[in-house]
Amino acid sequence: MSEEIHQGTGRRKRSVARVRLQLGEGLILVNKKSIDEYFPRESLKQIVRQPLDVTQSLTRFDIHVKAEGGGMAGQAGAVRHGIARALLDLDASLREPLRKHGLLTRDPREKESKKYGRKRARKAFQFSKR
């Protein structure tokens, strides 16, 4: 391969996405499936394409993603983060528009762990006075 491959790792919730970006015609593959096959909801596809929309490069690159862990929404967010980082690896001048739209910031929210003596992290069993 003579073309350069740019990489980025994105994370969101429990999901991790490894993104490989190279010049092409706008093909996005997630775990060897097209984006339309992998993400059934239109909102998730929009999330994934957001960094490409911001940088006006929707049909400029072929993107290959390996996503694992978490659920659909978490993986979509991880892919978005990874694409933004890969674009930054490609061209440092894209930092400003990506940063302005909050695409380079890793969303730090995680699930709170369950506590002993409780049903979930905060939910307790029903209190009975008598």
Image: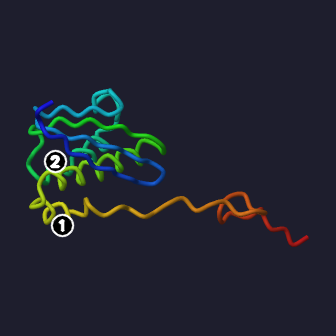
The 10 Å Cα crowd at callout 2, few under 14, some 14 to 19, many 20 or more, is many
The relative height of residue 102 versus residue 78 in the rendered view (above or below) is: below
Point 78% across, 63% down: residue: 117
Q: Amino acid at mark 2?
A: Leu
In the displayed orientation, state which residue is furthest to the right. Answer: 130
In the displayed structure, does residue 16 sit left or right of residue 121?
left
The 10 Å Cα crowd at callout 1, few under 14, some 14 to 19, many 20 or more, is few
Point 20% across, 45% down: residue: 6
Identify the disc placed on residue 100.
1
Q: Amino acid at mark 1?
A: Lys
In the displayed structure, does residue 122 sit left or right of residue 88?
right
| SS category of the residue bearing label 1 | helix
Q: Earlier in the sequence, mark 1 or mark 2?
A: 2
Quadrant for residue 107, please give it: bottom left
In the displayed orientation, state which residue is furthest to the bottom. Answer: 129
Residue 22 percent location from the top left of the image: 16, 38
Identify which residue, 1 or 43, lies in the foreground.
1
The relative height of residue 100 versus residue 26 in the rendered view (above or below) is: below
Q: Would you name the residue on which mark 2 appears? A: 52
Point 18% across, 67% down: residue: 100
Tell me, yes or no, whether the two marked residues, 1 and 2, touch with CB atoms within 8 Å: no
In the displayed orientation, state which residue is furthest to the front. Answer: 2
Separation (CA) of disc 1 from disc 2: 14 Å
